[in-house]
Amino acid sequence: MFKARTKIMNAENFNNKYRDKGGIVKLSEMIALLFPLSEIGKHFGFTKTRARQIISRIYGEPYDPRKCRKDALIKVMTLFAKHNDKKTFIRAFSKKDCFREALQKCIDEKLYDS
């Protein structure tokens, strides 16, 4: 049985194949804007599993927008802490999943006492 040989997907191959859909620039924008894998795949016409594989191959690391969103939220919470007292911070964010991590970062950065 003859098995079709597929090109290894790198940035150049991706850009050539998906140029009409924005190529590597569009993929990079979608990653930067934390699009879910399913939306990335939908845009380019492949599955979210394939999107995960392609992104990992091209960028050299797995893409997890949840982690990026968490990091961005902690950064914004820290900015909030720079202009608000600890009591206000606790009232505003105590129900967020990353509250303890963000509060510890504020303490480490000497924005709040422990």
Image (cartoon, helix red, strand yellow):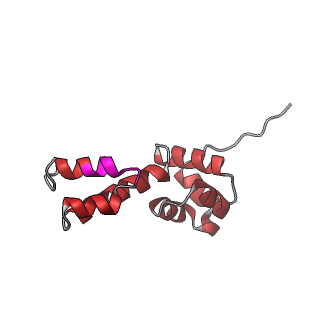
Q: Which residue extends farthest top? A: 1
Q: Which residue extends farthest right? A: 1
Residue 43 horizontal side relative to residue 30, left or right: right
The quarter of the image holding the N terminus is top right
Image point (61%, 43%), residue name: 8
41 inside magenta stretch: no
Query: Is there any visible trace of residue 79 in the rendered image?
Result: no
Residue 51 horizontal side relative to residue 72, left or right: right
Query: Is there any visible trace of residue 70 in the rendered image?
Result: yes
Decide which of 98, 68 is in the foreground and name it: 98
Image point (58%, 47%), residue name: 52
Residue 112 horizontal side relative to residue 24, left or right: left
Decide which of 25, 99 is in the foreground and name it: 99
Locate residue 6: give its quadrant: top right
Question: What is the x, y in percent for residue 68?
Answer: 42, 53
Decide which of 9, 42 is in the foreground and name it: 42
Image point (57%, 63%), residue name: 23
- On screen, 99 above or below 32? above
- On screen, 47 above or below 32? above
Q: Which portion, as a residue range, is magenta?
A: 96-103
Locate residue 20: give its quadrant: bottom right
97 inside magenta stretch: yes
Main secondary structure along the magenta-highlighted residues: helix
Question: What is the x, y in percent for residue 67?
Answer: 43, 49
Question: What is the x, y in percent for residue 97?
Answer: 41, 50
